[in-house]
Image: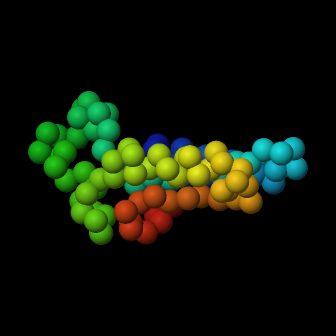
Amino acid sequence: MIDHTASEAALITLTKSVATHLAKRGARANVVAPGSTWTPLNEADPHVPPDGLAHIGGEAPLERAAQPEEIAPTHVYLTSDADSGYTVGEVIAVTGGIGDTR
């Protein structure tokens, strides 16, 4: 997970760095940081043993992974100038209550 975590940190840092510059040009840059999310890729991941699939997201206070439809509204929010027009350079965590470990 080191490579995954490093790439997440780089994306967050890049977004925060360019956000103020882009805002001056009328564009907003933000990050959606989801926690464990159930997708078909979970079953396709060769590093997750079949018995491990039942535990994905179990570390969250909600004791389950998110469903994609629980993450999507955050993206919709960020695309709406009416709703998020003043949101710039932010990281919105949708983690089911897991604290930020970045």
Write the residue at 78% across / 44% down: 27
Question: Where is residue 74 shown, x and y percent of the image?
Answer: 52, 52
Pick the front one: 70 or 57:
70
Above or below 63: residue 14: above
The mark total stands at 0
Pick the front one: 99 or 46:
99
Above or below 88: residue 25: above
Write the residue at 29% across / 33% down: 40
24 relative position to 94: left or right: right
Displayed quadrant of residue 50: top left
Question: Where is residue 64 shown, x and y percent of the image?
Answer: 25, 57
55 relative position to 74: left or right: left
20 relative position to 33: left or right: right
Question: Where is residue 46 shown, x and y percent of the image?
Answer: 24, 32
In this view, the residue farthest toward the left is 51
Write the residue at 46% across / 64% down: 101
Q: Is residue 10 visible?
A: no
Pick the front one: 55 or 29:
29
